[in-house]
Amino acid sequence: MAWRHIFNFFLGFFSAKKSFSIGIYGPVNAGKSSIANRICMDWTGQPLGSVSEIPHETREVQKKERVAIKAGGKILTMNILDMPGIATKVDYREFIEHGLNKADAQQRAKEATKGIVEAIKWLEHVDAALVVMDSTKDPFTQVNITILANLEARKIPVIIVANKMDLKKSRSDKIKEAFPQHAVVPVSALNGENMPKLYEEIAKKVSP
């Protein structure tokens, strides 16, 4: 009967290898958590976490494991990692502008800074990355360039998600012009527009 244990071990091993971890990166308030929630809602019926207009709402990595999606004629199992927003600096006064008192604002800034460091460390555990950008804003920023440079240095497959295509000021073409080396998929996390295209692109990136 020992062969059955060996068979089950290898079966479990190869099944586990079919899953992959996808990190969702981007600047503050680009819509990372909204994209994470949209993916989870589409395939599990439950959101991953909360969203807020206050910057750095996500200050720790939020995870949803073994989310099965169907795309490109395949069923893929992925672990979704919603990363804290990346910023070149965190100023506590920004939180005061959103109604927090000084002490709470300083604490929030401290947590946000720690979250940025954690997000970078998690690059070691990411198999592919969605880099979310606000398509209504200039994409050629220090934050976006830094995120992509870190991913490229580690040879992590990248898909740029041009979020907020539902807004009139959306210009996903500007993102394509700025970063022609990467696939760019315009979507709306708000209403789910073009999400099937994103799932197809994910399937292409993670396929052997």
Image: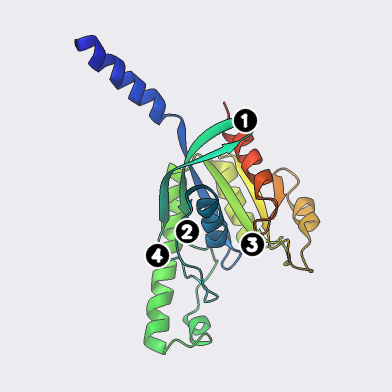
- Residue for badge 2: 47
The numbered mark at residue 114 is 4
Residue 73's tag is 1
Q: Nearer the viewer, mark 3 or mark 2?
A: 2
Label 4 secondary element = helix
Q: Is the N terminus in the top left, top right, bottom left or bottom right quadrant?
A: top left
Under circle 3, the secondary element is helix
Residue 196 lies, in percent from the top left, at: 66, 45
Which one is nearer the viewer's eye here, 143 or 97?
97
Where is residue 184? Give x, y as percent. Answer: 71, 48
Q: Could you tell me which secondary element the residue under label 1 belongs to?
A: loop
Q: Earlier in the sequence, mark 3 or mark 2?
A: 2
Q: Earlier in the sequence, mark 3 or mark 4?
A: 4
Q: Say which label, 2 or 1, has the lower sequence index.
A: 2
Q: Around disc 3, counting alpha carbons within 10 Å, would you say few (fewer than 14), some (14 to 19), or many (20 or more)? A: few
Q: Check whether the beta carbons of the residues at disc 2 and disc 4 lie within 8 A of each other.
A: no
For badge 4, the amino acid type reads Lys
Looking at the rendered image, the quarter that the C terminus falls into is top right
Q: On screen, 137 above or below 146?
A: below
